[in-house]
Image (cartoon, rainbow, N blue to C red):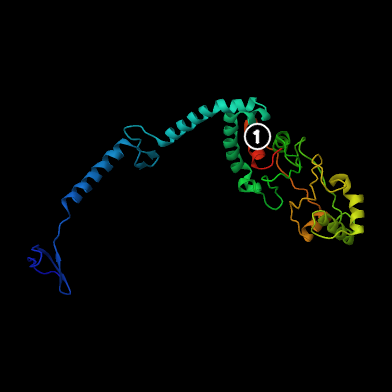
Amino acid sequence: MPTKIEKDTLSGRDTTGHEWDGVKELNTPLPTWWIYTFYATVVFAVVYCALYPSWPWLNGHAQGMLGYWSRAELTQELADQAKARAGFVDRIRKTPLAEINKDPELFNFAMAGGRSAFQTNCMQCHGAGGAGSRGFPALVDDDWIWGGSLQDIHATIEHGIRNADDKSRQSMMPRFGVDGLLTGAQVAAVTDYVLSLSGKAPATPEGAQIFQEQCVACHGPQGKGNQELGAPNLTDGIWLYGGSHDAVYRSIFYARNGSMPAWAGRLDEATIKMLTIYVHALGGGR
């Protein structure tokens, strides 16, 4: 409650005249340096608002006396970067893929550009760093369904897999169970045989016979696959849709015919080349 202003006996300062439960409030002013600092910030704020864009209006904002605009600065920086990159991009466009790998300067530029393009366009399916996921091939090993050379990878990226592009990679695995080509028991038998090729299950004569009759044309007599047909190698234990008995059974019974978009027309030729170099370098490119 308010009381009279008096001198505090311990500090020698005046009180404010307020007291709570016997505790009197001292009238202690702010330090002089703090006061001047506060005034300086007020002056700085006024000057800043006068020089730079600041106060919003109904149809815009104050432009500032300097005419500075951060978006214009960013636009100029991007233009400068594009100009600096233009020479490299043009060289990438004109240089054959194999020659890019032999030129350290171009190769490093292509790797940086390919990594950026991969993160923007490919990571959603193939995972960070090309680790892959169920139904989407890993790009970090040396197991290539359609071939791992620079030209093979370039064609796959450019035209895609099983899509409307007239140059896309095309193959079609029969739906052995759904279309009645094999019974459920026969599918189970050939599943065991397929798993036996990578040492995961014992083979049966029936499964071996069915494999020779139905699967050899694409996967080869030893199950090593055929990259020209997009038929995967069944002997290495690398499975796109899972290597359990159930997963392989379902692959045979229902078939798996995934699709990849064609990037020609979506990405320019230089970007596709840089992606090719990057994917080729991820692991085991041939």
Q: Secondary structure at mark 1?
A: helix
Task: Work out whether residue 212 or residue 164 is closer to the camera in this orientation and state it.
Answer: 212
Q: Is residue 96 shown left or right of residue 217?
A: left
- Residue 141 visible in image: yes
Crowd rating for badge 1 (residues with CA inside 10 Å; few <14, some 14–19, many 20+) = many
- Residue 181 visible in image: no
> Which image quarter is the C terminus in?
top right
The answer to whether residue 179 is above or below residue 265 is below
Number of dots carrying numbers = 1
Task: Work out whether residue 56 or residue 135 is closer to the camera in this orientation and state it.
Answer: 135
What residue lies at 60% left-to-right and 25% top-to-bottom? 91
Q: Which residue is mark 1?
A: 272
The answer to whether residue 30 is above or below residue 283 is below
Q: Is residue 84 shown left or right of residue 158?
A: left
Task: Work out whether residue 131 or residue 66 is closer to the camera in this orientation and state it.
Answer: 131
> Which image quarter is the N terminus in?
bottom left
Residue 260 placement (x, y as % from top left): 71, 43
Residue 200 placement (x, y as % from top left): 79, 58
What residue lies at 60% left-to-right and 32% top-to-bottom? 107
Residue 187 placement (x, y as % from top left): 86, 58
What residue lies at 16% left-to-right and 50% top-to-bottom? 32
Q: Which residue, as the protein is rendered here, is positioned at the far front?
A: 199
The answer to whether residue 25 is above or below residue 279 is below
What residue lies at 46% left-to-right and 32% top-to-bottom? 77
Residue 84 placement (x, y as % from top left): 51, 28
Question: Amino acid under label 1?
Answer: Ile
The image quadrant of residue 275 is top right
Q: Is residue 40 shown left or right of residue 17?
A: right
